[in-house]
Image (cartoon, grey):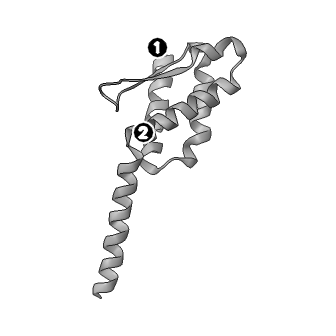
């Protein structure tokens, strides 16, 4: 019985570590860059300069996704295409970002 408990505890610890990793500033930065790159690749050439990401140098968990209203569609599509490859916590983070971008676009 104690061996089974250890297996369960080890699985829980691994899940917690995976969640922490998914919210690491370096992991988020990598995914932001991937999404921006994918969005630029799909957007018409006249919109590529309007897609970018800024990471705050003092607060590394703070990002600003810069995009024009006309390029939002490409950013949302890039987020959607990449969600399956993300760790769970990162996926939830970018799903929320997608919702916020869409809400802002409707203003």
Q: Is 62 left or right of 90, judged from the image as shown?
A: left
Q: Position of residue 22 (x, y in %)?
A: 41, 47
Which residue in the structure is indicated by mark 2? Answer: 26
Q: Position of residue 32 (x, y in %)?
A: 50, 32
Distance from label 2 to label 1 (Cα)?
A: 31 Å
Q: Residue at x 58, y 21 (%)?
A: 72
Q: Against 103, is 88 above or below?
A: below
Which residue in the structure is indicated by mark 1? Answer: 107
Q: Residue at x 40, y 55 (%)?
A: 18
Q: Residue at x 71, y 15 (%)?
A: 45
Q: Is 45 left or right of 100, judged from the image as shown?
A: right
Q: Position of residue 90 (x, y in %)?
A: 44, 43
Residue at disc 2, secondary structure = helix
Q: Which mark is residue 29?
A: none
Discs 2, 1 touching: Cβ within 8 Å = no
Location of the N terminus (image quadrant):
bottom left
Neighbour tally class for label 1: few under 14, some 14-19, many 20 plus, Cα within 10 Å = few
Q: Residue at x 46, y 34 (%)?
A: 29
Q: Against 65, is 31 above or below?
A: below
Q: Residue 54 or 100: which is nearer the viewer?
A: 54
Displayed quadrant of residue 81: top right
Mark in the foreground, 2 or 1:
2
Q: Position of residue 95 (x, y in %)?
A: 48, 38
Residue at disc 1, secondary structure = loop
Q: Is 59 left or right of 100, judged from the image as shown?
A: left
């Amino acid at each position: 019985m104690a061996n089974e408990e250890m297996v369960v505890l080890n699985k829980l610890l691994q899940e917690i570590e995976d969640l922490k990793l998914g919210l690491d500033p370096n992991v988020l930065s990598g995914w932001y860059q991937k999404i921006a790159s994918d969005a630029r690749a799909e957007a018409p050439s006249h919109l590529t300069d309007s897609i970018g990401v800024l990471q705050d140098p003092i607060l590394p968990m703070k990002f600003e996704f810069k995009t024009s209203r006309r390029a939002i569609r490409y950013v949302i599509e890039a987020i959607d295409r990449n969600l399956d490859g993300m760790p769970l916590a990162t996926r939830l983070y970018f799903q929320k970002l997608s919702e916020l971008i869409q809400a802002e676009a409707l203003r």
